[in-house]
Image (cartoon, coloured by chain):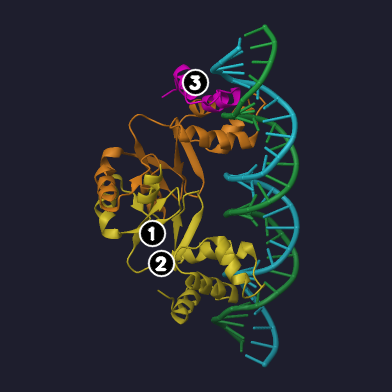
Chain colours: A yellow, B orange, C green, D cyan
Amino acid sequence: MSHDMPSISARLRQAGFRVTPQRQLILDAVCKLGGHVTPETVYKQVRSITPAINRATVYRTLHFLTEQQILAEMALPNGRTGYEIASETPHHHLVCRQCGGTVEIADGMIRPLAEEIEAQYNFTLDMHHISFLGLCAECQEEK
Amino acid sequence: MSHDMPSISARLRQAGFRVTPQRQLILDAVCKLGGHVTPETVYKQVRSITPAINRATVYRTLHFLTEQQILAEMALPNGRTGYEIASETPHHHLVCRQCGGTVEIADGMIRPLAEEIEAQYNFTLDMHHISFLGLCAECQEEK
DNA sequence: TTTGTTATTGCAAATCTTTGCAATAAGGAG
DNA sequence: CTCCTTATTGCAAAGATTTGCAATAACAAA
């Protein structure tokens, strides 16, 4: 999945934010890299194109784009954070703490639980931020 | 809930680990503080008793005690990690990203989902490490 | 008790991430 | 096109966490 820069730009400006070269470069990098990226891989990717970017800007922009729901955050096994393009249909992840591999699980699978939690505790879940940590099939066997 | 140091000590030695003053101080600190603690609060607590402790040791020991299932890790809203005494009956958390407050949810509530995931993906979930992030009832209203 | 093995610690340096502040530049208004 | 406001960036320093390595000290065995 790619991103529609014109419409994203319009949306940001509409909300009073600015569309800077850095933001575009970072979003391009996330798309180009594909899948789940880390602040460091994004930084390197953008750097390979131009030196006109600072690490702090990468971190700040990744947070910003997540707030704007253009990206989605996901927890990685070591307590680090990964990012991916926010998809229309939310989905979640099984993350292997051993090999770091991830498996996507459909939103439908956890929706019943989510609704039960929301109803019972009046707690609104961040539905784009759910990672279940554990051991994948391969890593279980190696044990 | 407190900890039974004699039996824990025996268990660790049994497995070839050593029971050092630092480990005891750190475990005591977690118990004394109660609830969910962070590496920093543990460090300060131990420090207030004796200067004979290094920050790196606190981090390493917290990880170690988690591996030994004496403590359990939990994800905090800012990507940080919290710890608590591992209880007999596993439970999970709803963590408010706004106020940082936590609510415990019973294991029974998510067990059906967990079993479905394990069956369908052959993925073993870390059952002590599940945190759902979101907004608690109070913080929703403030919006 | 003494000794030997090696798990653990402390330290310092490396990583990773966040934050305050002054300088820069996006983009709406004139 | 120029000016003005202020959102963003870069920089540097602070904070948080991890890691390599030599020194220390548990604790099992003699």
Quick check: B59 left or right of B134?
right
Q: Are marks 2 and 1 in contact (CB under 8 Å)?
A: yes
Residue A128 marker: 1
Q: Disc 3 on helix, strand or loop? A: helix
- Quarter occupied by the C terminus of chain B: bottom left
Label 3 crowd bin: few (<14), some (14–19), many (20+), radius 10 Å: some
Depth order, front residue of A11/A1: A1
Q: Name above or below for residue A66 compared with residue D22.
A: below
Q: Are marks 2 and 1 on the same chain?
A: yes
Q: Chain of mark 3?
A: B
Residue located 34% across and 37% down the image: B91
- Write down the residue under mark 2: A86
Whole-number angstrom distance, CA of label 3 to CA of label 2? 48 Å
Give the residue type at disc 3: Ser
Magenta residues, start to end: B1-28
- Is residue A33 among what the camera can see? yes
Q: Give how far apart the Cα atoms at labels 3 and 1 are.
A: 42 Å
Tell whether D29 sits left or right of B138. right
